[in-house]
Structure formats: structure tokens, C-alpha cells
Image (spheres, helix red, strand yellow):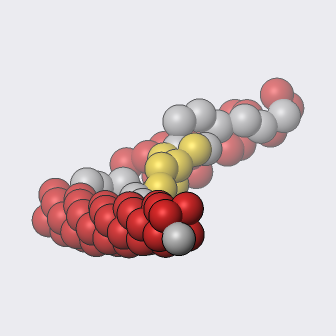
Amino acid sequence: MYGGYATGITWIPIVSSFKTPEKELNAKVRIFKIIMDSRKDNPVWVENCIKLSASVTRDKIRQQRAIFNRMQQISKTQSEIGDMIMDS
């Protein structure tokens, strides 16, 4: 089983294979078939997960841009202070 993270919000399990001891395989085939047959995709849920993930990603990008801009301002201010010290 493996799954994907939607930007840290949710984890979606995806069953890709089953593993069982060989002696128990025939007894478990029916259970595995029931599990596989009962799985249904919900397109609305998937779409909502994607929208939420996109929204969170946009927010994180905005935060990163704000941090970068602030760091640029700090760097500029430090350079100006350094120049003033050197000029005096």
C-alpha cells in the first residue's frame, strides 16, 4: 500500500497489491475481491482535495514571497547602515 500527501493536509491510501502466506491465499481471495469491488472513486471529493491543496500551496507561496521581500528590505537596510558607518 502506498499513498500521496496533498500538501500535508491528508493522506490517501492506495492499495496496489496484497501479500499473504501461500497457504492462506485461497482463503483470503474472497476477502480481497470484496475489498476491491467495494472501492469507488468520488470525483467531487478528489476535486475538493485538489482545490484545497492548491489553496494551501498558494498561501505558502505568498508567505515565502513575503519572507523573501522582508529579507531583501533587511539586506538593503543593513547595506545602507554599513555605507553610513563607512562615510562617517
- Closer to us: 12 or 53: 53
Among all residues in the image, which is located at the extreme front? 88
- Residue at 53 percent across and 36 percent down: it is 16
Q: Position of residue 2 (x, y in %)?
A: 57, 44
- Residue at 64 percent across and 37 percent down: it is 18
Horizontal relation, residue 67 to residue 57: left or right = right
Observer able to see residue 8: no
Give the quarter of the figure containing the N terminus. Answer: top right
Work out whether 21 lies above or below 70: above
Among all residues in the image, which is located at the extreme top? 22
Q: Position of residue 81 (x, y in %)?
A: 49, 71
Observer able to see residue 39: yes
- Residue at 28 percent across and 55 percent down: it is 40
Horizontal relation, residue 39 to residue 20: left or right = left
Q: Quadrant of residue 42?
A: bottom left
Q: Position of residue 48 (x, y in %)?
A: 19, 68
- Residue at 82 percent across and 28 percent down: it is 22
Work out whether 56 lies above or below 47: below
- Closer to us: 34 or 54: 54
Q: Quadrant of residue 71?
A: bottom left
